[in-house]
Image (cartoon, helix red, strand yellow):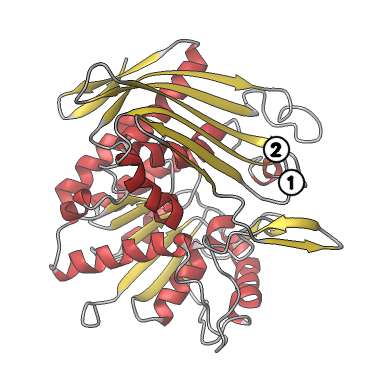
Amino acid sequence: MANVPKLNILMCGTGEYTTGWTGSGASQSDKKVGVVGLTCFDLRRLGKVDQLSMVGVNGKKFPDIRAHLEDKIGKVYKDMDVGFKSYPDDNTVDPDSYKKAIDDLAPGSAVIIFTPDTTHHPIAKYALERKMHVLVTKPATKLLEHHQELIALAQQNGVACWVEHHKRYDPAYADAKLRARALGEFNFFQAWMSQPKSQLETFRAWAGKDSDISYYLSSHHIDIHCWYVEGKSIPTRVIASAATGIATSEPYNCVEETEDTITLMVDWQSIENPKHKGTALYTASWTAPLKAGIHSAQYFHYMGQTGEIRIDQAHRGYYVTEDASGKSAYNPFYMKYSPSETGHFDGQRGYGYVSIDKFVDAARSINAGTSKASDYDGHGLPTIKNTVLTTAILNAGRISLDEKREVKIERDGENWKLV
């Protein structure tokens, strides 16, 4: 793609996943220097990206963010320019600053959204209406109707709209997809994902108010499961249950609506064989122990008609033990932060990086006229169209918790509805 024009990118959101910076300083998680910003800076170094900008709500954070990026990235990796245009200015707080930032882009630019869950839909909608390519973090939206609106907008404007479900690019998860589809009809799926209680401090501003731990974490494995059985089975019923009491107590004191752990039980129906029904359990928690040696516990068990698959993504057989911090498990397949022999960033094969890189390649190809946005719906990629059932399940789970009832998922012409 050497002759394809470079892509201009706006990064929406200035938090941990974009910059590695939190309100209290540098992140202490496995994303110490972020993912989105670092990847975009490197793609610019490699000639795929041209102009970079970043937008948040509070411009007063940008001096600290710039200093952090220069210290942790600019001074660590050779030839890495960490410059970007920021919105709003350094003295302004403006929750609508994303509009000005998007308006300053030319059509065909890209908007990467890593912001609180309730803001995904309005930002993505504003960008798509102005013919921008969009990559939005999971969950794409909180409501099924909003997800389906984004599908329509992307189609109308001929632009890419993808969801940043990076686990699809994990080599083990990707390999397991083909193996799962060879195991006959789907029968059972169980997934667990958790993060330590310290995340309640990081996400205190929105935890239990704007979203929940199921939207935040279970979205990963719900998408993986939907991907594995795509075209073979469909979800039909969701029942949710939640544990409470830790997040709302000392020292975290989150709002009373904050759940600790949420489990969604989902019925699945085979498309081709009425006799075959499956069951799935998706559990997510942000009240895991603080010193478990991992930031995110994450594993699943898939059982089909003729076999089963188990993957523990948190433990890859790579452990480091230090006097100060004890034993820790590392996952360099996600993001490799150690420099290359030449001193350059060397994480281009990590699936956190690949997820953004593939989107950038698609956007550039669409801009050059060598592909259409709709082409990617058939490639097993996490396009907005291909991820609609993930949102349907998550939305149904929230309704089930709030209204204490089962929620059914049904076809509604070309769309889906919750009953």
Check the image and name the residue furthest to the right.
Answer: 323
Mark 1 surroundings: few (<14), some (14-19) or many (≥20) residues within 10 A: some
Q: Of residues 185 and 410, which is closer to you in this image?
A: 185
Q: Is residue 287 in view from this perspective?
A: yes
Q: Nearer the viewer, residue 52 or 240?
A: 240
Q: Residue 224 sits in which quadrant?
A: top left
Q: Nearer the viewer, residue 318 or 194?
A: 318
146 to the left or right of 317? left
Instruction: Residue type at mark 2: give it.
Output: Ala
Q: Position of residue 32 (x, y in %)?
A: 64, 62
Mark 1 lies on a secondary structure that is loop
Image quarter of the N terminus: bottom left
**Quadrant including the C terminus:** top left
Mark 2: secondary structure: strand
- Closer to the observer: label 1 or label 2? 1
Image: 5 above or below 224: below
* Residue 104 seen in render: no
Q: Which residue is tagged 2?
A: 288
Q: Is residue 235 above or below residue 404?
A: below
| Residue 172: x %, y % from top left | 45, 53
Disc number placed over residue 292 in the picture, else none: 1
Q: Position of residue 257 (x, y in %)?
A: 62, 23
Q: In the displayed structure, would residue 287 be above or below residue 128?
A: above
